[in-house]
Image: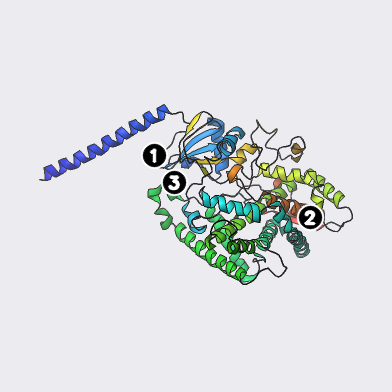
Amino acid sequence: MVFISNWIVALFCFLVFIIFLCKGFYNDASRARKTLPPSPPRFPVIGNLHQLGLHPHRSLQSLSKQYGPLLLLNLGSVPTLVVSSADAAREVMKDHDLIFSNRPKSSMAGKVFYGPKDIAFSPYGELWRQVRSICVLQLLSNKRVQSFRRVREEETTLMVEKIRQLGSSSSSINLSNVLLSLTNDVVCRVAMGRKYGIGEKGEKFKWLFKELGDLLGTFCVGNYIPWLAWISKFNGFDARVEKVAKLFDEFLEGIVEEHRDRTNDEAGESDFVHLLLEIQAENRAGFRLENDVIKALILDIFAAGTDTTYTVLEWTMAEILRHREILEKLQNEVRRIAGRKLDITEDDLEKMPYLRAVIKESLRFHPPLPLLVPRESTQSVKLMGYDIAAGTQVLVNAWGIGRDPSLWKNPEEFHPERFFETNIDFKGLNFEFIPFGAGRRGCPGITFATVVNELALAKLVHKFNFALPNGGKECDMDMTEGTGLGVHKKFPVLVVATPHSC
């Protein structure tokens, strides 16, 4: 009986071996019939995950130099197409935009963003089209952005006063913290009608968003190697996600209920929550706008509006502090346009082409999301002569494209004047410059973010002369990148700010 049992086990193992062998031959034959993008060698199980490194945008740029503008990686069990040229990006985000408009599944995004039911992470479909339409037409239209002009001008003036006060009591100022508070306060007032960054509740609020940013940038092994999903429970990742999702839901539920009890805020402004509740009550969306969708959209506005805007301002200030001649040229333009006025207004911004060029160069050099948000193909498609299978994840290296020497002269130099020689813009029509993405999945908040960046930068260089602490030299500033989905400076921008007498 023991002999028979051992024989059956041996036969079973042999059959399993034959099945896997046949499957391997079939897959090899299938690949032979298709023209796949070039791929570097990979390890079993993890595939090419080990090649991403701490800064994937830099690692993928190096790989693209070796393998070409389209590169196929296997991140665990997930086939991933890396796009590293303007032509390839155009095919993905314009020619085949519909096919590449889906989002890969993310267990974290599903829990925190209610399904997900937001704009950034929800799968392409009817719900996504409806909520994006609400944001584009009702929340982030040019008219609506202009309606919040007073909020931006007030908060940037308060930023100037905060720097003045900090500078009078300390030898140096953590400018990164000031810029983060500015963008947080602007988005709070616009989205929810008042600030939430003060006191004990404010500290909890700031911690929540920092934790959300950390989670978004944390590698979740279960998304790429499903049978290792248990690791997220073992290392505490799942518990962190559950905690953040619960706390955010309690906070957002309180915001929604607070708004149901009033029609307008104290200043008579209609913030985003108020507008969403109006749309829900009047059924203007053409579908039932659930509370979870409203909360997911509020969270989107914060996650995108606060972090990316602050990141752009932080990198911009760091670069102009490193390039004294650029700072002086920018100050001269802003102060000339301001004249004897005590303050800069948004009307003045149109007369400041160098300021806009500086921000453009900062977006080229330091896009806030270097790999944008991943996409996923919904069907098989031919891309630049290669066969791309349905369900392939797509990473567009906006950082690498912005530093492509075939597209940009001296791409590793911070040189705002380059934008006086070209009409290239970042609004999604020029694929050599896509810090906000393009196509259906492009960022709908470009106008809102741009005007905050321009106004804040103009007021900073109008009101202050800046230097590095302890007589530091510009070349000594540490420009090391942090890690995560959105890339900040690893170390904050510390400055000595001396008020400029207008």
Image quadrant containing the N terminus: top left
Q: Secondary structure at mark 1?
A: loop
Q: According to the image, label 1 marks what residue? A: 44
Q: Earlier in the sequence, mark 3 or mark 2?
A: 3
Q: Secondary structure at mark 3?
A: loop
Q: According to the image, what is the colour scheme of the structure? A: rainbow
Distance Cα–Cα, label 3 vs label 1:
13 Å
Q: Position of residue 253 (x, y in %)?
A: 55, 67
Q: Are marks 1 and 2 in contact (CB under 8 Å)?
A: no
Q: Secondary structure at mark 2?
A: helix
Q: In the displayed image of the protein, which residue is found farthest to the left? A: 1
Residue shown at 58% from the left, 45% from the top:
441
Q: Residues within 10 Å of mark 3 (few under 14, many from 20)?
A: many
Left or right: where does residue 237 sit relative to residue 142?
Answer: left
Distance Cα–Cα, label 3 vs label 2:
45 Å
Q: According to the image, label 2 marks what residue? A: 459
Q: Relative to 231, does residue 19 appear above or below in the rendering? A: above
Look at the image and tell me whether residue 96 can be seen: yes
Q: Earlier in the sequence, mark 3 or mark 1?
A: 1
Distance Cα–Cα, label 1 vs label 2:
54 Å
Mark 1 residue type: Pro
Q: Residues within 10 Å of mark 2 (few under 14, many from 20)?
A: many
Image quadrant containing the C terminus: bottom right
Q: Position of residue 365 (x, y in %)?
A: 67, 42
Mark 3 residue type: Tyr
Q: Position of residue 479 (x, y in %)?
A: 66, 47
Q: In the displayed image of the protein, which residue is found farthest to the bottom? A: 261
Marker disc for residue 224: 3
Residue shown at 53% from the left, 33% from the top:
70
Mark 2 residue type: Lys
Q: Quadrant of residue 22?
A: top left
